[in-house]
Amino acid sequence: MSKVSYYLQDHLSGEVMDSTDARRYFSTDASVFTITPTLAVYPRNEADIRKTARFTWQLAERGRLLPITARGSGTDQTGAALGTGIIMALPAHMHRILELDSRGGKVLVEPGLNYGKLQQTLMTHGHFIPAAPSSMEYSTVGGAVANNASGDRSFKYGDTRLYVESLRVVLANGEVITTKPLAKRELSKKLGLATLEGEVYRRVDALIEENEKLITGLKLNVTKNSAGYDIWDVKTKNTFDLTPLFVGSEGTLGIISEISFRTIPYNPSKTLLLGTFDDITSIAEAVRELRSMSELPSSIELVDKGVFELLHETHPNLLKDPLLNPYPNFVLLVEFDDINERSQKRDAKKAQKILTQYAKAIKIATTSETQLEFHRIRQSVAAIINQNRGNLRALPIIEDGIVPPESLADYLDGIYQMLAKNHIKTAVWGHVGDANLIIQPYLDLSQVGDRQTIFRLLEEYTALITRLGGSTSAGHGDGRLRGPYLEKIYGSEIYDLFQKVKQIFDPYGTMNPGVKMNVGVDDIKALLRHDYDVGAGYEHLPMR
């Protein structure tokens, strides 16, 4: 072991590893990048995180940078779970449910907890967190908070940020703070602290006060957003809360050690509608009217013909029950989950009338068996994005864009034009109710031409989303992949504020540097893998 590893192992209750195989394992996540870390730390508790952060801060004060990257299950598709210094592997020990108020629906957890296990526990008590991503069975709650994750039911219920009540966070120098909404008197006490916490509160407060008009005027008009830092929701008329800054910050401002979630009642009984469509205009009009309903569907999901055609090549029997070949151009899945069964049926009938105006055909599933068949259409995406086509792999490079809902038709049309221009066969799916779509083009990372295509697509895709007033990161985070394009999305003035936020919390750059902020296209080009797989993720058939 190195001197650093020996030192940390001597001072931590958790384990430290710097073996070649451990470093190799942590050199990849679910992104197209690779970075080999110096060592891995498996913190047993918050004290271990504090000691590690304090150690790297002291090294940085002496001019030596050994950054920390907090990591969950390594499912991040943007490279945010990779780093050159210390990988802090949280699931090994910090995976407990600490408190559960089954009556009030509050739950306190550690960041390494598997999201699916948390959700199962909550459901047995009649509650759930509706912002759960589709990857919840193999990802952690800490990762979801770090990315401000969202899922299919976020259309009705919103993203993770809305369900995080408070956090315990280890700052870059090892101090621990608790974030929550503060009244003016509580904020005044924080502003007077002679610590890094006090410095953070003073400087963030001043930054928002001095740039109030700029911040207010440049908020993106999208239903969910993880791009940059949420400087818009920190200060309200009556409260000041740092929690929104940390949710979606991807470990670049501090390391989350505890999360307090609020939950809502869960209803296992649902009504699901399936509509098939011929054209983009009909889809956009149907979604527009569904969005105008007084009681919203819990989800509106889209799957296009490209998914079915690719699936037919490799798994031709997977869809033979819910869909027959020739396949429709688009399938829309609309779900209702109102607790009141009568209201749920009433709203489903209203949605059926809307779909009748635009869809080619409609089916309704009220039984669990039929609903499973319908859901297989959306879940079938997993079978194609993890299936090789020779040396071609579906790569997660343009997979989380979102635009204002009224721009959905232009967004879809722009995507198909971009793919046709670049001669790429792929599939499109996603949370169409939020105009949040996913595309994973098939490319070969071993080919120079395809590696160049990646960055051409990123440029064109960012330009399309920017033109439509959208965000490149709806719920998967910026990471290293989308960090270079943040300034194009927001403009230089807001990007400058983001840089100042990063500097306030992380003056020495020890908190996951190269992620989200201060990263360029040339930086990430050097990190591209020459092949691609999702590693241990195959145990769970990853999907998005």
Image (cartoon, rainbow, N blue to C red):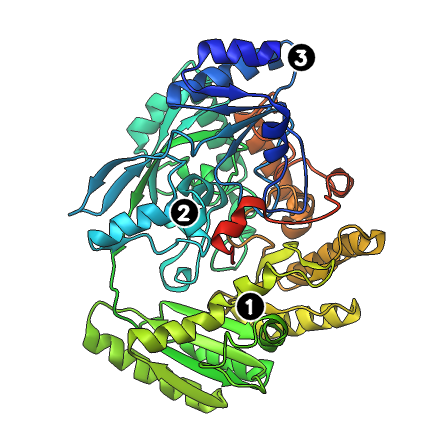
Q: Amino acid at mark 3?
A: Gly
Label 1's element? strand
Is residue 225 shown above or below 526? Answer: below
Q: Secondary structure at mark 3?
A: loop
- For label 2, the SS is helix
Name which residue lies at 53% across and 48% down: 537
Lower position in the chain sequence, tag 2 or tag 1 = 2
Q: Quadrant of residue 517?
A: top right
- What amino acid type should be assigned to the residue bearing mark 1? Trp
| Front in this rendered view, residue 187 or 256 | 256
Discs 1/3, front: 1
CA separation in Å, label 1 and label 3: 47 Å
Q: Which residue is mark 3?
A: 63
Q: Which mark is residue 101?
A: none
Tell which tag, 2 or 1, sits nearer the viewer: 1
Disc 3 packing (10 Å; few <14; some 14–19; many ≥20): few
Name of the residue lying farthest toward the left: 103
Relative side of 212 to 485, left or right: left
Residue 429, label in figure: 1
Q: Residue at x 84, y 55 (%)?
A: 449
Q: Which residue is mark 2?
A: 161
Q: Is residue 425 above or below residue 457?
A: below
- Left or right: residue 349 compared with residue 203: left
